[in-house]
Image (cartoon, grey):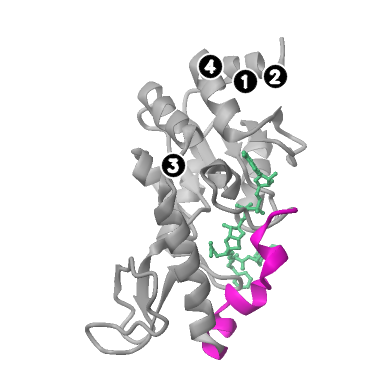
Amino acid sequence: MNELEQATKRIQNAAFPAVLTGAGISAESGIPTFRGEEGLWKQYRAEELATPGAFRQNPELVWEWYNWRRSLILEKGPNAGHQAIVKLQERFPQMPVITQNVDGYHAEAGTANLIEMHGNIFRARCTGCFTVQEHRSVDNLRPLCPLCEKPLRPDIVWFGESLDNGVVNSIFAILQKTDLLIVVGTSGAVYPAAGFASQVYDSGGAVIEVNPKPVIPCALQIKGKAGEALPALVDLV
Ligand code: BJW
């Protein structure tokens, strides 16, 4: 039995599968990943753009970077990988999908039970009154809160920031319950998401990884692109 057939069996036998995705699932949409040859961190320093300190020091630079990414995300859309996950939810309607991505493509594709653990690029949060609002502008470098006129910031979890408590609790409840975690397109470089696969495995669950460069030793590894491997897998299920 090859990896695809083994993975098919594991999914068919799963009682409560869950999915974790990272930047790789949006790569075939034309959205750059963070790490690797073409990754965003090759061109930009994370400390200058994705930390609270960076925003305090140079909010315009941070907004410029997020405006550029927002316009790119708006130009493109979800791909066959996102769609395959929606199709898998037809078979497992309760299946949670946890994403580290902020591009909103899972929601756009129609994914239910979605947790966007690092936030969403189309939301902004007030640094004064903390109100969260939709933010779709691609050119404002100094957006202000319409309620209190304090500066807005992207509603995104930056390095060194804690994830929302409610989000963390929901994720840990899923990880305790799931008997199969399907991990797609993440390098496993950033915590807490980097620890999810081993957490499931250590409690007796199985892990399937879909990635052209798999990194999770405890996983059944399917070496391939999400937009090709996921539809093939879901068709077999
Ligand atoms: C394909 C493909 C195709 C290509 N198909 N696949 C424990 C140990 C050590 C450090 C820490 C720790 N706990 C916390 C930390 C600190 C820190 C951290 O993890 N640092 C590491 C660098 C070590 N974590 C945090 O600060 C987190 N906060 C936290 O834990 O709070 C508690 C705390 C508070 C104070 C101090 C310490 C702890 C917050 C993390 C926030 C991450 N934010 C970012 C940027 C903002 C979002 C944005 O602007 O978009 O989120 S970083 C960036 O990395 C982004 C991503 O969501 C995240 C993960 O990246 P991802 O998705 O894995 O992408 P890549 O590019 O790395 O990988 C792409 C993969 O796709 C590759 O494997 C390719 O092969 C593959 N691929 N094409 C399928 N077609």
Residue 225 visible in image: yes
Residue 3 numbered mark, or none:
2
- Residue position for label 1: 7
Q: Is residue 46 magenta?
A: yes
Looking at the image, is 69 positioned above or below residue 153?
A: above
Residue 13 numbered mark, or none:
4
Q: Picture coordinates of residue 27 (x, y %)?
A: 58, 45
Magenta residues: mostly which secondary structure? helix
Q: Earlier in the sequence, mark 3 or mark 1?
A: 1
Element under disc 4:
helix
Q: Earlier in the sequence, mark 4 or mark 1?
A: 1
Q: Residue at x 60, y 73 (%)?
A: 160
Q: Earlier in the sequence, mark 4 or mark 3?
A: 4
Residue bounds of the magenta highlight: 37-57
- Residue position for label 3: 78
Horizontal side of 38 relative to 230 (left or right) equals right
Q: Residue at x 65, y 71 (%)?
A: 46
Q: Picture coordinates of residue 93 (x, y %)?
A: 35, 28
105 or 9: nearer the viewer = 105
